[in-house]
Image (spheres, grey):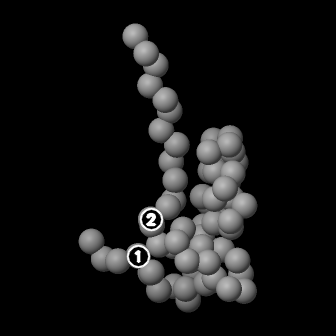
Amino acid sequence: MASAEPIIQSPCNRVCVMHPRRQICIGCGRSLDEIARWIQLTESERADIMAQLPQRLTAVTGGNSVAPAV
């Protein structure tokens, strides 16, 4: 039986626009470097970044959600 590849959690919501001054995505809150290395990061490293994202997004959006309402 073939083993299933692990599912890597990602904050990506397909709103890929970089904030011009802060250089983070206004959709997910990650830097280009974090986005590029995401699959290579350990689960712990990803969790640390994920914990920072709400504060980063508040800083760039002023608390307004940029994701479309579902």
Residue 42, placed above or below residue 33: above
Distance from disc 1 to disc 2, alpha carbons, whole Å, reads: 7 Å
1 and 2 marks in contact (CB < 8 Å): yes
47 vs 70, left or right, is right
Quarter-of-image position of residue 65: bottom left
The residue located at (63%, 59%) in the rendering is 35
For residue 67, which numbered disc appears in the image?
1
The x and y percentages for residue 4 are 44, 25
Instruction: Give the residue furthest to the left.
Output: 70
Q: Secondary structure at mark 2?
A: loop
The residue located at (51%, 59%) in the rendering is 11
Instruction: Give the residue furthest to the top.
Output: 1
Q: Secondary structure at mark 1?
A: loop
Residue 54, placed above or below residue 47: below
The residue located at (47%, 72%) in the rendering is 15
Location of mark 2 (residue): 13
11 vs 41, left or right, is left
The x and y percentages for residue 37 are 69, 51
Query: If you read the primary sequence from the N terminus, does the residue marked by circle 1 or circle 2 appear first?
Result: 2
Q: Where's the C terminus, which quadrant? A: bottom left
Q: Where's the N terminus, which quadrant? A: top left
Q: Residues within 10 Å of mark 2 (few under 14, many from 20)?
A: few
Residue type at mark 2: give it.
Asn
